[in-house]
Amino acid sequence: MKLKLRQRVLFSALVTASATALLGGCTTSSQPGTASDAASTSKTGLTSPGAISSPSSAGVGLPSPWASDKGSPAQRAAAQGALVAYQGMWNDLVRLGATSDWKNPEMGRYMTGGVLSSWSTSLAKNKRDGLVLRGSTKDMPRVVSVSPAGQPTRVEIADCVSDSNWLQYVATTGKVANATPGGWRRSEAVVSYDTDWERWLVSQQVIGEVGSC
């Protein structure tokens, strides 16, 4: 089942409420790019382009998992590598978001293209505003597609991510900047194998509104 990733997530504030754009080209880089689109402010660590509808509970409405038992050894290895990259991206965002360290070259360990550019821009805005992110996300990713079969270079992942415990704080005082809770949001991602860097990188991502999974 193919995910319909027609939009780029605009993380220009790491907390935007509604924004959409076509996915740009995906070029590997450890340096942050620039997201030119801005959007209105939300409350927590994730953004919600409004591209995905809203089921009632976590995990509901996600595509069926890819049947790994029917895949080739190369496909199973690709699926595992892509999941490591996807979850590594979230781990790095939580860690670097705690200091809004958007210039850290480790931002590019698991992301590329528009995803890297947008998240870098988001952390940079938090830095300018004197904000940091504390807490962590919760997720339940599943691989839904691995292609091509012979030598996979593209893995699609569907996830339900919670930002309820990933909130903005004022860096100088440690006070919560906005305690409004988030919730479960559907995340769809493409993880691509970069032949130059010889690793899997999240190259496309869409995140839905609170309640979209």
Image (spheres, rainbow, N blue to C red):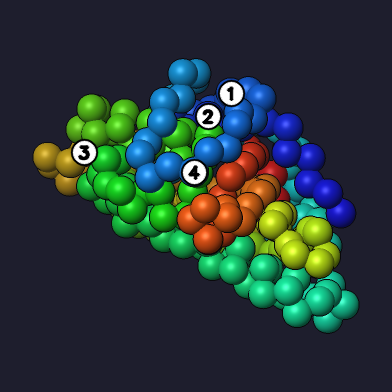
Question: Which residue matches tag 1?
Answer: 19
Circle nearer the N terminus (1, 4) = 1
Residue 160 against residue 16 in the figure, above or below: below
Q: Is the residue marked by circle 3 packed among few (<14), some (14-19), or many (20+) residues within 10 Å?
A: some
Report helix, strand or loop for mark 4: loop
Circle nearer the N terminus (2, 4) = 2
Expressed as whole percent of the image width and height from the top left, the position of residue 205 reads 61, 42
Question: Which residue matches tag 4?
Answer: 28
Alpha carbon distance from label 1 to label 3: 25 Å
x 52%, y 53%: residue: 196
Q: Disc 3 or disc 4, which is closer to the eye?
A: 4
Q: Is the residue marked by circle 2 packed among few (<14), some (14-19), or many (20+) residues within 10 Å?
A: many
Q: Residue 111 or 14: which is nearer the viewer? A: 111
Q: Amino acid at mark 1?
A: Ala
Report helix, strand or loop for mark 3: strand
Alpha carbon distance from label 3 to label 2: 22 Å
Question: Which residue matches tag 3?
Answer: 170
Circle nearer the N terminus (1, 3) = 1
**Which disc, if any, is residue 10?**
2
Q: If the image is split into quadrants, where does the N terminus sit?
A: bottom right
